[in-house]
Image (spheres, rainbow, N blue to C red):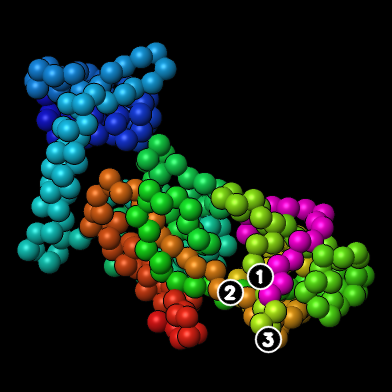
Amino acid sequence: MDRFNAMQAFARVVETGSFTKAAETLHMSKTSVTQLVQQLEARLRVTLLNRTTRKVNVTADGAAYYERVIKLLADMDDAETSLSNASVLPRGRLRVDVPSPFARTILIPALPAFHAQYPDIQLDMGVSDRMVDLIGESVDCVVRGGELTDLSLVARRIGDLSLGVYAAPNYLEKAGVPSHPQALSLPPHYIVGFRWARSGLAFPYAMYRNGERVRVQGRYVISVDDGNAGLAAGLAGLGVLCLPDYMAREHVSRGELVRLFEDWPLDPMPMYVAFPPNRHVSAKLRVFIDWVVELMAQHAPIVDRLGRRH
């Protein structure tokens, strides 16, 4: 029995709650994972997992052993990636999930520089705004905009996206230019709804001026859960939309979008990188997070309460 593979298989079964999911994330057969765990239990002479036809539960002995195993696996990873030889670079497969506009506009264009610095890191990138089961899907980290509601995750604030309200010229020709944010809640105006998976709010950001705060509750023709789809709907003239300024800049310069209510600021959208609390921050994950932090400092630095950028 390969004790390292057996411990890794056991840890992944605990994290995913399934032999099948563990096998998929380890690129092994379910039979191999099952045999490794059985061999580990035979060696230890304890039952680590209770199996039923529907689910797998960790026993009390298994839970205690799991806490020791993840520390051992973390130490082994550090031993391999923190050698004194400077030529040894972080390596391996890293699974991340990021919002689609952020991937298209900021992250992917900068990836050649990251790859040049860390050529042995292989990124499996999910591109979505959906809720991700980090443990069940074996995702190492996610980058998300908006306040995080899952307090079980370890989160690091990496930036603040400045926001604006925009509309296409053909929309404004039909509906007219609104003079006040409240006008967006009345006919003939429509908004492009954005459905946050966490809150379900369609137009969640408030505008403010001289102590007055306005939160728009408008009608919509279409509501989406993806930033690029929302941008496409706005460009098509389907309504007024709230966008991070970096997404709108190119379209404003080409005359495809017009910024509205420039004297009504919006609170910036915080950006976070998050990962499970029991997931060891490996060398490859650490350098990826540090790189994303540096990237956000260039494009959307954190803003403090006094409006100062950091």
The location of residue 123, given as percent across then percent down, is 38, 53
Return the residue at label 1. Answer: 206
Q: CA distance from mark 2 to mark 3?
A: 14 Å
Return the residue at label 3. Answer: 210
Res 166 visible: yes
Return the residue at label 2. Answer: 267
Pointer 2 local density, CA inside 10 Å: few below 14, some 14–19, many at least 20: some
Q: Pick whichever of labels 2 and 1 is earlier in the sequence.
A: 1
Rendered-image quadrant of the N terminus: top left
Q: Identify the residue at image location x=38%, y=48%.
A: 152
Q: Identify the residue at image location x=40%, y=44%.
A: 134
Between 78 and 159, the one nearer to me in the picture: 159
Instruction: Tell me the element at label 2.
Output: loop
Q: Identify the residue at image location x=56%, y=50%.
A: 198
Left or right: residue 235 compared with residue 114: right
Q: CA distance from mark 2 to mark 1?
A: 7 Å
Res 125 visible: no
The location of residue 170, given as percent across then percent down, is 87, 71
- What residue range appears in magenta? 213-229
Left or right: residue 35 compared with residue 232: left
Between 250 and 166, the one nearer to me in the picture: 166
Left or right: residue 114 compared with residue 81: right
Pointer 1 local density, CA inside 10 Å: few below 14, some 14–19, many at least 20: some
Of tags 2 and 3, the one toward the viewer is 3
Marks 2,1: beta carbons within 8 A? yes
The location of residue 260, given as percent across then percent down, is 75, 79
Indicate the amino acid at tag 3: Asn
